[in-house]
Amino acid sequence: MQSKSPTPTSSPISSDPSLAGVLEAISLAMLGVFLATVVVRAWPLKILDSQWQLGFAAELISNASLALMGALLTPLALAFHSGSDRLRARRNAFRRLALAAAIGFLLLIPLQAFAGWRLYRTVTSTAEQQTSQSARKLTELRQAIATATSPQEIQAKLNQLAGPNAGLTPTQLRTPINQLRQELLVGADQAANRLQQRIQAQASFKPDRLVKETTRIALSSLFYAAGFAFLSGALPRSNQRSVAFGWRSGKEKF
């Protein structure tokens, strides 16, 4: 029985150094655009600001495809020019960086979730504080209007509660106190109704937009983490694809 000669191992992609050069240039351009966009968005740094954290996370997710595709084009370029030591060294460097990127995207999930929760608490707390202050000032103003004996007393109380720019008009200052008191109490009742509507709106407020954005960023971070983990070699891949893109398993040498 005649034995079969072993089939020579060859790359499933034919060599094309010129195409490899084009892919390399596109890879560097995409990575450069990604870095430039992220750096510009991150400046000025406000690491402890929840709104900055959410904005930066959203910008990172929106442009992460550039980094992933740019990093993937380098091993593809190496597949077309397997003899390039420069591409091989860059591919190996990107593999190490891809592992760090995968971990970073995983960490982004709890970080942006916490930032979203803290921003929601800050916004609602500030709104409640402002509403409470407005209600207190309105109560004091109604008391001042009810007990005032002259328009000047009301004017002084308005300046105290709302600042020097607030006050009565020249016509109101000449209005008899009883008539002025009735007009101002009607205005105070209208302001109280608006304040009550604002309180009800805050009570029924649901952070739907914030929850949706947080969920979008969390899911996108998970998928990008998987993509970069695959690129780094942390996830299993078939031998045929590994050879085609210049990859090897974690136990083999680069």
Image (tube, rainbow, N blue to C red):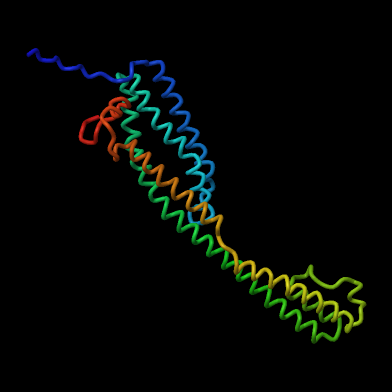
Residue at 47% over, 49% down: 217
Q: Nearer the viewer, residue 58 or 45?
A: 58
Specify the farthest residue to the left: 1
Residue at 44% over, 24% down: 25
Q: Nearer the viewer, residue 165 or 119?
A: 119
Q: Nearer the viewer, residue 111 or 230?
A: 230
Q: Is residue 127 left or right of residue 156?
A: left
Locate residue 237, reporting x and y percent: 29, 35
Q: Is residue 176 left or right of residue 163?
A: right
Specify the farthest residue to the top: 2
Q: Quadrant of the C terminus?
A: top left
Q: Is residue 37 left or right of residue 92?
A: right
Q: From what the image shows, is residue 10 above or below residue 106? A: above
Q: Is residue 172 left or right of residue 24?
A: right
Say which quarter of the image contains residue 146. bottom right
Residue at 30% over, 26% down: 246
Count every numbered label the image shows and give the total.
0
Q: Quadrant of the N terminus?
A: top left
Locate residue 73, reporting x and y percent: 40, 28
Locate residue 193, reporting x and y percent: 73, 73
Q: From what the image shows, is residue 164 above or below residue 175? A: above
Q: From what the image shows, is residue 8 above or below residue 216? A: above
Say which quarter of the image contains residue 152. bottom right
Residue at 39% over, 32% down: 71
Q: Nearer the viewer, residue 223 or 136?
A: 223
